[in-house]
Amino acid sequence: MSSFQDFESSPSKDMINTGLNNSITNLTPSLNFSSASSSASTTISAPATTTTSSSPPSTPSRYENQKRRDWNTFGQYLRNHRPPLSLSRCSGAHVLEFLRYLDQFGKTKVHTHLCPFFGHPNPPAPCPCPLRQAWGSLDALIGRLRAAFEENGGKPEANPFGARAVRLYLREVRDSQAKARGISYEKKKRKRPPQPPSSNATTQ
């Protein structure tokens, strides 16, 4: 079994919620160099240095920051699991537990079948239906965790985030939320650009 990099620890369950809903801001400390003060009677000349042009370090993209935060959040979830789980023993079933656990932090109203607003995209009044994680958020989360797993040494064939059970669960969430909220998640098909006339066409 391949070895995996250690997760960064988060202090509490609240940090898991914060990690899923807030953006990471990387603070790069600036280095301030101060020259030693010389005495009044002594002058110190600095040796000549040759400056070389170097490209500035690249700043991680928003996607990379989000992926790192999600990876750390999942690691914290495994450590808080009872009993604690190691990444090497994590399966698709554990990923499903994690997704259901995240529903308590959801902000998307999903109407039940008994709700009079079931299937209405814009309900005219509030209702007691539960809040859930939106399908789009879960789908994007799994995509980032699937990539982070392999970037941290995991084998593609053993990736729990790509398990069939996880794909079926996401499909079920998509379909059920689409019906409950009266919206469609179907991707619009892109229109193909008109094909240029063939160069082999003969002209009369």
Image (cartoon, rainbow, N blue to C red):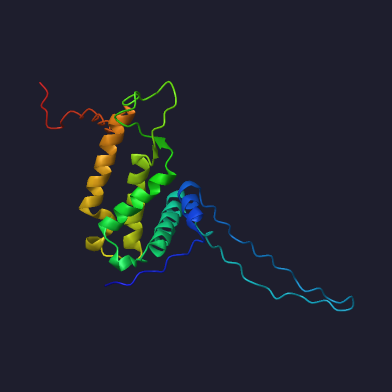
Q: Is residue 184 above or below residue 54?
A: above
Task: List the single residue furthest toward the right.
Answer: 41
What x and y, as percent, mark residue 182? 31, 27
Q: Residue at x 28, y 38 (%)?
A: 174
Task: List the single residue furthest toward the bottom.
Answer: 42
| Residue 10 left/right relative to 185 | right
| Residue 50 left/right relative to 204 | right
Q: Residue at x 70, y 76 (%)?
A: 47
What x and y, as percent, mark residue 96? 30, 52
Residue 163 visible in the snapshot: yes
Is the N terminus in the top left, top right, bottom left or bottom right quadrant? Answer: bottom left
The number of numbered discs placed on residues in the rendered structure image is 0
| Residue 39 lies in quadrant | bottom right
Front residue of this view, candidates 41 and 8 = 8
| Residue 55 left/right relative to 135 | right
Front residue of this view, candidates 24 and 54 = 24
Q: Is residue 201 above or below residue 9?
A: above
Front residue of this view, candidates 67 and 84 = 84
| Residue 158 lies in quadrant | bottom left
Residue 59 visible in the snapshot: no
What x and y, as percent, mark residue 13? 48, 56
Is the C terminus in the top left, top right, bottom left or bottom right quadrant? Answer: top left
What x and y, as percent, mark residue 35? 75, 71
Q: Residue at x 49, y 61 (%)?
A: 10
